Amino acid sequence: MVPVAGPTVVRRQLGRRLKRMRETAGRSVEHVVANRHLGISRAKLYKLEAGHHPAKPQDVAALCRFFGAAEEDIDTMTALALATQGASWWHVYGEDAVPEWFSLYVDLEPAAKSIRTYEAELVPGLLQTRDYATAVYQATSAWEDVAEIDRRVTVRMKRQAILDRPEPPNLHVVLNEAAILRQVGGAEVIAEQVAKLRKAAQRPGVTVDILPLAAGAHAAMATPFLILDFPDPAEDPSVVYLDTPSSAAYLQKPTDLTRYAAMFDQLLDRTTPLLEYLS
């Protein structure tokens, strides 16, 4: 199974198109809410335009007509609404195979054109070996049974299939040197993991850089982060992803995007290519 963009991506696209259509028509949120025939509350309109929930085709069609859209545009929008109700690729492993706070990221990842990430402690999931991933889960989710950890590791391994697509995303990883010095799973596991990183760094479209401990203080000391960029920025603006063991933040404000892109560029001024580091 090759992961595909989940319904969250379609919801984001539909929401932006609805908002753009409303603004082009000169309709405010108050105009929509005041029209009782639409039956759209302020909260519901916000969720539709933000892409937070599946959309009912009849609601989308009614809004489009209220905004004066052409019939062919209404057909396109209602088709998108239907697509928002599909299941994510990872549901085949169970609807709880991915934590709720992480599910948005797993839906967005296959749609990305490029992925830039800085990791302080861990090799990123897209480049982990199975044994390394298992060791990480055993340490961070020690309360889970063996079967549950194996299920989560399987989903993580399946995510890596996006790198084998005919047109994979560009992946640029900056790893704190500590991430490959730490003996996760023991000497054999980390040796296998470093070998996989070496092989990945030789693939077209994959860049792995090491931030040496000797580099000292740097811009990203406060938190690891990940930036997803998409093929059509107008429909799918970039997203900065931050996480903790039990929650996540998705930043999309231009000021946040500019800040984290600048942080990533500042890191690159201090890094060493992995292959050079290992030589």
Image (spheres, rainbow, N blue to C red):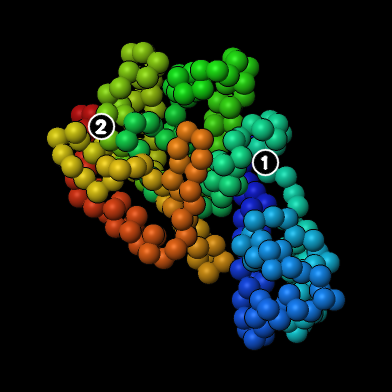
Residue at 75% over, 79% down: 34
What amino acid is found at the position of numbered circle 1 in the picture?
Trp
86, above or below 157, in the image? below
Q: Which image quadrant is residue 225 in?
A: top left
Query: Which amino acid lies under the numbered mark 2 shown in the image of this protein?
Result: Glu
Residue 98 position, x and y percent, is 61, 35
> Residue beneath label 1, please?
89
Provide the residue designation for mark 2: 177
Q: Quadrant of the N terminus?
A: top right
Q: Circles 1 and 2: CB distance less than 8 Å?
A: no
Q: How far apart are marks 1 and 2 (CA)?
A: 33 Å
Q: Is residue 221 above or below residue 234?
A: above
Decide which of 88, 47 is in the foreground and name it: 47
Tell me if residue 110 can be seen: no
Q: Which residue is drawn at 75% across and 84% down?
A: 68
- Please, what secondary structure does the residue beneath circle 2 have? loop
Pointer 1 or 2: first along the chain: 1
Q: In which quarter of the image is residue 254?
A: bottom left
Q: Which residue is drawn at 80% across and 67% down?
A: 59
Let me know if residue 277 appears in the view.
Answer: yes
Q: In which quarter of the image is the C terminus?
A: top left
Residue 18, by quadrant, is: bottom right
Image location of residue 125, percent across then percent down: 46, 34
Q: Tag on residue 20?
A: none
Q: In this view, does 207 lie to the left or right of 13?
A: left
